[in-house]
């Protein structure tokens, strides 16, 4: 068994605008508070993000494969590699991240689903940080999209 995080949000933007924000490196850096982002937006493409003040020695690096990309409805990231200055995670994960978008009342409903967190208590801190992190990140995501000019 594994734990998951599932959060759903609504925004008065087109699914195309919302989907583009998930794949555009400059926007990812803004809403995800990242230092750098590299995206190859295609099936089996790359989704890599770094965080930290020093671009040459980032605090955190997350690299994933784009395992599914159905524009503008679904983006799935898998095969995560996670690196931290603090060291490797003390447990194994099989993380997968899915963004699902649908049209509703002239806007978009976006659901974030992250699966693959181990039930083991050694993963509790990481899991709880991710729950809080997704809440903060998606609040930023919605704010950036609301402010973005077309």
Image (spheres, grey):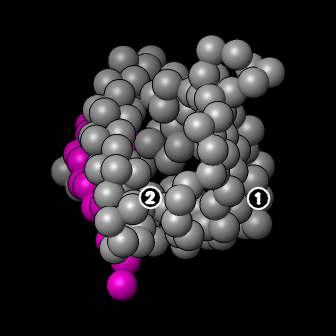
* Depth check, front residue: 100 or 121: 121
C-alpha separation, residue under disc 1 versus residue under disc 2: 16 Å
Q: Tell me whether the residue at label 1 lies in contact with that at label 2, contact meaning CB atoms closer than 8 angstroms.
A: no
Q: Can residue 41 be spotted in the picture?
A: no
* Depth check, front residue: 4 or 57: 57
- Residue located at (61% from left, 67% from top): 78
Q: Is residue 9 magenta?
A: yes
Residue 116 as seen in the image, left or right of residue 13: right
Look at the image and give the residue range highlighted in magenta: 1-14
Residue 10 as seen in the image, left or right of residue 120: left
Chief SS of the magenta region: strand
The residue indicated by pointer 1 is: 45
Instruction: In the rendered structure, find residue 99 and report the number of the disc placed on it.
Output: 2
Instruction: In the rendered structure, find residue 2 and report the number of the disc placed on it.
Output: none
Q: Residue 59: x, y in percent?
A: 62, 29
Q: Residue 122: x, y in percent?
A: 39, 62
Residue 19, above or below 124: above
């Amino acid at each position: 068994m594994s734990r998951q995080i599932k959060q759903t949000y609504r925004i008065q933007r087109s699914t195309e605008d919302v989907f583009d924000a998930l794949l555009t490196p400059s926007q990812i850096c803004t809403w995800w508070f990242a230092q750098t982002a590299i995206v190859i937006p295609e099936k089996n493409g790359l989704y890599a993000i770094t965080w930290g003040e020093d671009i040459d020695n980032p605090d955190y690096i997350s690299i994933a494969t784009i395992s599914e990309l159905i524009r503008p409805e679904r983006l799935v990231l898998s095969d995560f590699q996670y690196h931290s200055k603090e060291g490797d995670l003390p447990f194994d994960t099989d993380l997968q991240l899915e963004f699902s978008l649908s049209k509703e009342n002239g806007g978009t409903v976006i659901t974030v689903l992250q699966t693959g967190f181990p039930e083991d208590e050694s993963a509790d801190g990481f899991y709880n940080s991710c729950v809080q992190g997704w809440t903060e990140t998606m609040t930023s995501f919605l704010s950036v999209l609301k402010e973005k000019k077309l």
